[in-house]
Image: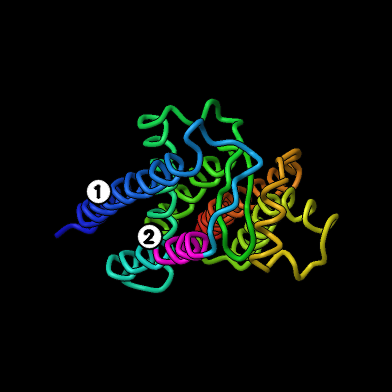
């Protein structure tokens, strides 16, 4: 079968799987909010029982494992498997918000704050921020899949890794800053302290500077390989005359 057709089939199947997982994720959140936020989700958050909180953390880890498992099956090399993982993660994350909007009318706007992730510390940010990251991940994944040989520049890898670190820091910035004002660094990773903090924490500042710098690093890393190969091909054509 033609490689392009095979890739399109893989993309279609992974997209369907990831959309379904997005619905599953949103359904779980609908149940949790019905139980703990009957009047609507808001900050500061309610304190969850320890068994529920631990279950939720394990569920998030299991979700990552499921996405990685599908990527492992679909990919033919470590790099392609990583690309498919990014693609599935991004589609899942986008449709998680799509289904929440359809099911319960949340978020109210793209600037509504949300708890984004719980591992290794609590991530927070406006809804638009993970959606932007997801769109970038889709772009990165497809470039790796369709232009694998061009995406091997060391500077590209460095820029993408550095950009990812900056974006990660932007997501944990607000809650971590709040925690460090009240507790020690080790308290960030302790269930008891984070639960106490969440009962008082109201998001106040998303670090758009870090986030934008991270996005620019990644996007620059995506463009550079094509500029490099274009320049190299031009030099080759001139030297071949």
**Front-most of 161 and 173?**
173
Q: Which residue is mark 2?
A: 84
Left or right: where 107 falls relative to 20: right
Number of residue marks: 2
Q: Whole-percent x and y of residue 96?
A: 41, 43
Residue 60 lies in the magenta stretch: yes
Residue 98 lies in the magenta stretch: no
Q: Secondary structure at mark 1?
A: helix
Work out which quarter of the rendered image holds the N terminus and state it: bottom left
Q: Residue furthest right?
A: 181
* Residue 166 position (above or below residue 71): above
The numbered disc on residue 135 is none
Query: Disc 2 to disc 1, how far (Cα)?
Result: 12 Å
The numbered disc on residue 12 is 1
Residue under the image location 36 percent in, 29 percent down: 102
Residue under the image location 28 percent in, 65 percent down: 74
The answer to whether residue 148 of the structure is visible from this angle is no
Q: Upstream in the sequence, badge 2 or badge 1?
A: 1
Q: Which residues are magenta?
A: 51-62
Left or right: where 128 falls relative to 66: right
Residue under the image location 50 percent in, 30 percent down: 39
* Residue 38 position (above or below residue 200): above
Q: Whole-percent x and y of residue 151?
A: 50, 61
Residue under the image location 67 percent in, 60 percent down: 165
**Front-most of 208 and 30?**
30
């Amino acid at each position: 079968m033609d490689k392009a057709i095979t890739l399109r089939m893989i993309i279609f199947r992974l997209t369907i799987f990831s959309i379904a997982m997005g619905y599953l994720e949103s359904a779980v959140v609908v149940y949790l909010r019905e139980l703990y936020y009957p009047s609507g989700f808001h900050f500061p958050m309610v304190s969850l029982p320890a068994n529920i909180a631990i279950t939720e953390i394990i569920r998030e880890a299991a979700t990552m494992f499921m996405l990685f498992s599908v990527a492992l099956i679909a990919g033919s090399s470590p790099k392609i498997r990583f690309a498919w993982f990014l693609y599935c993660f991004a589609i899942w994350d986008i449709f998680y918000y799509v289904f929440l909007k359809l099911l319960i009318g949340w978020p109210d706007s793209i600037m509504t704050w949300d708890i984004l992730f719980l591992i290794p510390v609590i991530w927070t940010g406006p809804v638009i921020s993970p959606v932007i990251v997801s769109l970038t991940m889709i772009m990165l994944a497809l470039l790796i899949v369709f232009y694998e040989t061009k995406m091997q520049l060391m500077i590209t890898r460095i820029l993408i890794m550095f950009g990812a670190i900056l974006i990660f820091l932007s997501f944990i910035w607000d809650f971590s800053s709040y925690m460090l004002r009240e507790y020690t660094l080790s308290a960030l990773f302790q269930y008891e302290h984070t639960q106490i903090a969440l009962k008082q924490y109201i998001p106040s500042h998303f670090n758009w500077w870090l986030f934008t710098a991270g996005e620019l690093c990644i996007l620059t890393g995506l463009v550079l390989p094509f500029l490099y190969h274009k320049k190299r091909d031009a030099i080759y054509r001139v030297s071949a005359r």
